[in-house]
Image (cartoon, rainbow, N blue to C red):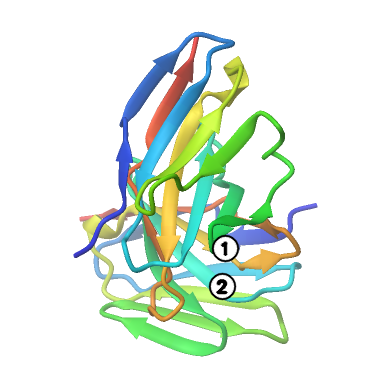
Amino acid sequence: KNEVEQSPQNLTAQEGEFITINCSYSVGISALHWLQQHPGGGIVSLFMLSSGKKKHGRLIATINIQEKHSSLHITASHPRDSAVYICEPGRTGNQFYFGTGTSLTVIP
Amino acid sequence: EPEVTQTPSHQVTQMGQEVILRCVPISNHLYFYWYRQILGQKVEFLVSFYNNEISEKSEIFDDQFSVERPDGSNFTLKIRSTKLEDSAMYFCASRDPGTARGYTFGSGTRLTVV
């Protein structure tokens, strides 16, 4: 049983497309994080949110606490957005759970 | 922009040896974390640290592991008696609860146990 489910697992898009990555979780949250892992392995935190919606540049993150679901949207996708996107719905007890990630490839 | 610094970037060690992975978190952050990622697998939480003590730890973080903040700036992860399965990328992160983005991650230490 996965506490955090991400979909799709893999995604290939044409440059300029609108992209949506979904995260459903069964664990309780303090605050949900969206992370970006670059092909070289480095991890960058994109968003931390506990309600509603946040926007940063071409990235938008939304969360529905009641439905235990969050989405990450990328508008006007670009090849440099190619990365693995990871959802982490925050602490449950003494544990933090991570999604397995969505591997995004944006083709020029 | 402030960074979390991890050293070394790559460590090779013999099975059974002890290793210390070092991290310098962002100075005004309050929460510190260690994670690991075995090659090809998802990121796993090891331990969080707040107010000079462990606040949460996972089942992975057993007696083989320990963390310290010896001097107020460094944050170290010690792995005793390393095993082959400890080979992974180890990430340190720090967090300021007031920021919009949450964590700042270091670039990781790749540990290879041979």
- CA distance for labels 1 and 2: 6 Å
Q: Residue type at mark 2: give it.
A: Leu
Question: Is A4 in front, or is B100?
Answer: B100
Determine whether, in the image, residue B38 is placed left or right of residue B20. Answer: right
Mark sitting earlier along the chain (1/2) = 2
**Residue that protrudes farthest toward the front in the picture:** B71
Q: Residue type at mark 1: give it.
A: Glu
Q: Position of residue A2 (x, y in %)?
A: 74, 54
Q: Are marks 1 and 2 on the same chain?
A: yes
Residue on which the image places disc 2: A32
**Residue that protrudes farthest toward the bottom in the picture:** A52
Q: Confirm or deny contact between disc 1 and disc 2 (CB under 8 A).
A: yes
Question: Is A103 in front, or is B5?
Answer: B5
Q: Position of residue A40 (x, y in %)?
A: 30, 40
Q: Which residue is drawn at 71% across and 32% down?
A: B63
Q: Where is residue B111 in the image (x, y as percent from the top left)?
A: 44, 25
Q: Quadrant of the image for the N terminus of chain B?
A: bottom left
Q: How crowded is mark 1: few (under 14 residues within 10 Å), some or many (20 or more)?
A: many
Q: Which residue is drawn at 56% across and 83% down?
A: A50
Helix, strand or loop at mark 2: strand
Q: In this figure, what is the number of numbered marks? A: 2
Helix, strand or loop at mark 1: strand
